[in-house]
Image (cartoon, helix red, strand yellow):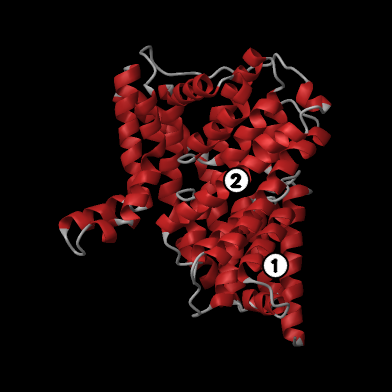
Amino acid sequence: MTTAQGLQLVAALLSVILLTVLVLRVKIHPFLAILCASIFLTVAGRVPVTQAAASFSTGVGATLSQVAVVLGLGAILGQMLAASGGAETIAATLLQRFGEKNLSWAMLLLGFVVGMPVFFEVGLVLLIPIALTVAHRSRRAPIAVALPMLAGLSIVHGLIPPHPAALLAMTIYHADIGRGILYGLLIALPAAVLAGPIYTLLIGRTPVMQRLSTDLLVEEIEGEGRRPGILLASSITLFPVILILIGSLADKLTRLGSPVNTGLHAIGVPWVALLIAVLWSFYALHRTRGITLARMEELSQQSLAPMAGFIVILGAAGGYCRILQDSGIAQTIVSAALRAHLPLILLAWLIAAGIRLATGSATISMITSASITTAAIGTTVVPHPELLAIASGAGSLIFSHVNDGGFWMIKGFLKLSLKETFATWSVMETILSIAGLVLALLLSAILPA
């Protein structure tokens, strides 16, 4: 390694440390912290200012062009699912079918199903009231009920499109979205079982898992009509994934270039699939709750407002990653890592895990890992790029701690101490991450090259 390359590595490391300190200690908003880290990287890495500015703008545009619309539609869909009572319908049906003895499995499936179309924060706010209500009625500790649900919610957020970061990682790796969803499900399900029901059982006798709580949040449902039935509620939740899968199979189901083929490809575009699901949720909300179009517009506006901050953070992260890539710093990092002859799946996971621990952001770590690993691949054809995206997603879930907003949300909603949050939520996330890596490596060995 040359002196210049060594300085590049030091600059990259210091920029990550600066980002962490600004967010964790100085309490600067992550958007501003990323901008400061990008400027520091430009100066310390001796990147020409004009090149860095162009790279940052390109990165912001490329990132937001992929996920901004998806992010907005996902927020609206989550709001409609809550307001219609669809989430409660799904929860009640699962609990009725599984019974109290299999409560952990019901909550795991609930997190999986509801987590498919909504973002983690939206799904968390949506499902926590249900978990607390179930805990109260079954006389169990809130964390004992919620942990399996959180495992399902978290794993689909990190591994399975159309979640923005997972979708963007698939795009960066030039992976097939349909196969990415299929492989993601094959890996996410057993990982969530390990981190959810099985881990909950293993720590079931600890004090935190035995402590009851009477503090309940109440889910506010719009309108005065009946709740949607299970088929209607499930259709709202699963529409995007089903449509994307259909789009990915269009060439196998229909003749290339035919109107039907073109139509199937169109509805399989993630933002189109989400738009169809949102419009369908409007119908369900009007039919079951009698909500007017004017009120639906208000609900949509309410759901979009909190997403503004996330969108600018996501765009800034894309700009920061593009500077890493265009300056050659990413290639230097990759070259240093490749000298250890690491498999690409392990490399993608390690990069994501390191950045996750440093910054607390699963999104930033996933996108950065994908960008850096893609630089290592270059023009080389990779047999299963979907598994690289999954590895980046799995690494981005490792050990959530105090620099992660989700950590504080879990602590506050479930009335946990710091120690209890580490012992439950943080360990659960780590199990998800390591299991995702191991299963991705196993699947890569099984699938034909």
Rate crowding at label 2 as few (under 14), some (14 to 19) or many (20 or more) other CA atoms within 10 Å. some
> Label 2: which residue?
190
Query: Is residue 248 left or right of 58 when viewed as pictured?
Result: left
| Residue 387 placement: quadrant | bottom right
Q: Amino acid at mark 2?
A: Pro
| Residue at the farthest left position | 259
Question: Residue at position x 69%, y 45% from top?
Answer: 429
Q: Quarter of the image containing the N terminus?
A: bottom right
Q: Where residue 18 sits in the image (x, y, percent)? A: 75, 60
Q: Is residue 430 above or below residue 212?
A: below
Of residues 32 and 311, the one drawn nearer to the viewer in this rendering: 311
| Residue at the farthest bottom position | 2
Q: Where residue 81 sits in the image (x, y, percent)? A: 43, 29
> Label 1: which residue?
40
The kind of secondary structure element at disc 2 is: helix
Question: Residue at position x 64%, y 71% from top?
Answer: 343
Question: Residue at position x 81%, y 35% from top?
Answer: 418
The kind of secondary structure element at disc 1 is: helix
